[in-house]
């Protein structure tokens, strides 16, 4: 999986830092409670500015994380474990 990363872009006022987006496939999510738990735990990680979840109940859900710095799979896996019985898809 190739994560997006923040990019520096020159503007007339100097360089601007853009937040990067990473997409993860997550298993074990079945309902809105799962979505809220995952959003809360991932949102608590340093530098995270937003989390979007496309729920596929009982299947592979798509989770998009917006952050100042790329997150490691280990960070995401730990947050998912803290949220409940959710796992990164292989």
Image (cartoon, grey):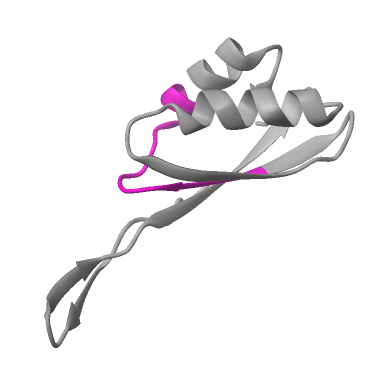
- Identified at 71% across, 12% down, the residue is 85
Does residue 87 appear anywhere in the picture?
Answer: yes
Q: Which range is magenta?
A: 63-76
Instruction: Return the x and y of residue 89 as percentages of the image width and height.
Output: 68, 31
Does residue 88 appear anywhere in the picture?
Answer: no
Figure check: 67 above or below 15: above
Q: Where is residue 11, by image quadrant?
A: bottom left
- Identified at 53% across, 23% down, the residue is 41
- Identified at 68% across, 12% down, the residue is 84
- Identified at 14% across, 73% down, the residue is 15
Q: Is residue 69 magenta?
A: yes
Q: Where is residue 14, by image quadrant?
A: bottom left
Figure check: 9 above or below 87: below
Instruction: Return the x and y of residue 36 as percentages of the image width and height.
Output: 69, 29
Q: Is residue 72 magenta?
A: yes
Left or right of 85: which side holds 19? Answer: left
Q: Where is residue 38, by image quadrant?
A: top right
Left or right of 68: which side holds 20? Answer: right
């Amino acid at each position: 999986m190739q994560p997006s990363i923040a990019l520096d872009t020159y503007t007339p006022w100097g360089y601007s830092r853009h937040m990067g987006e990473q997409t993860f496939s997550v298993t074990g999510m079945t309902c809105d409670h799962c979505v809220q738990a995952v959003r809360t735990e991932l949102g608590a990680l340093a530098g995270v500015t937003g989390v979007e979840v496309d729920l596929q109940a009982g299947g592979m859900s798509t989770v998009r994380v917006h952050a100042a710095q790329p997150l490691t799979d280990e960070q995401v896996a730990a947050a998912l474990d803290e949220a409940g019985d959710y796992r990164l898809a292989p």
